[in-house]
Image (cartoon, rainbow, N blue to C red):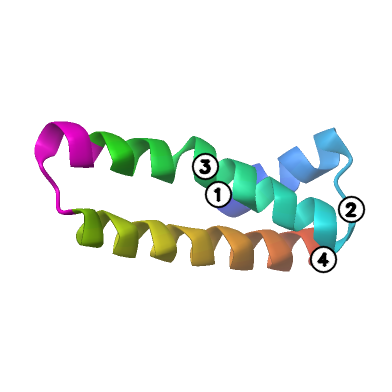
Amino acid sequence: MVTVAFALAFGELGITGVGGVLLFALVVWLAFPVAILSGSIVWENVPFRTAALHAGDWLCKAVLLALIVGLWR
């Protein structure tokens, strides 16, 4: 499902090349997982190290997925 969303976004926004794909992945990462995880630190007392680990995991996924989809299309 996320793969389709990325592919549609790349097409609609005219994103091509590695630079555009990586920038898109970074923006998606900042907009969603980082926002959610920062809220969990503040309001749910999740330890920072745990949230940072999850944030890194999300970043890796976003970058890899964006690279695969963006360079494949």
Q: Distance between the residues labelled 2 and 3?
A: 20 Å
Instruction: Name the spot of residue 43 as percent of width and height, x first.
Output: 15, 31
The overriding secondary structure of the stretch rendered in magenta is: helix
Residue 4 appears in the picture as rendered = no
Q: Which residue is denoted by mark 1 in the rendering?
A: 2
Q: Distance between the residues labelled 1 and 2?
A: 18 Å
Which amino acid lies under the numbered mark 4 shown in the image of this protein? Leu
What's the residue at 61%, 62% (across, down)?
63
Q: Is mark 3 on a helix, strand or loop?
A: helix
**Is the residue under label 4 in contact with that under label 2 (CB below 8 Å)?**
no
Q: Which of marks 2 and 3 is in front?
A: 3
User: Reading the chain from its start, which is encountered first: label 2 or label 4?
Assistant: 2
Q: What element carries label 1?
A: helix
Q: Which residue is denoted by mark 4 in the rendering?
A: 71
Residues in magenta? 40-47
Q: Choose top left, top right, bottom left or bottom right for residue 21.
A: bottom right
**Is the residue under label 2 in contact with that under label 1 (CB below 8 Å)?**
no
Q: Is mark 2 on a helix, strand or loop?
A: loop
User: Reading the chain from its start, which is encountered first: label 3 or label 1?
Assistant: 1
Q: Say whether residue 58 is left or right of residue 15.
A: left
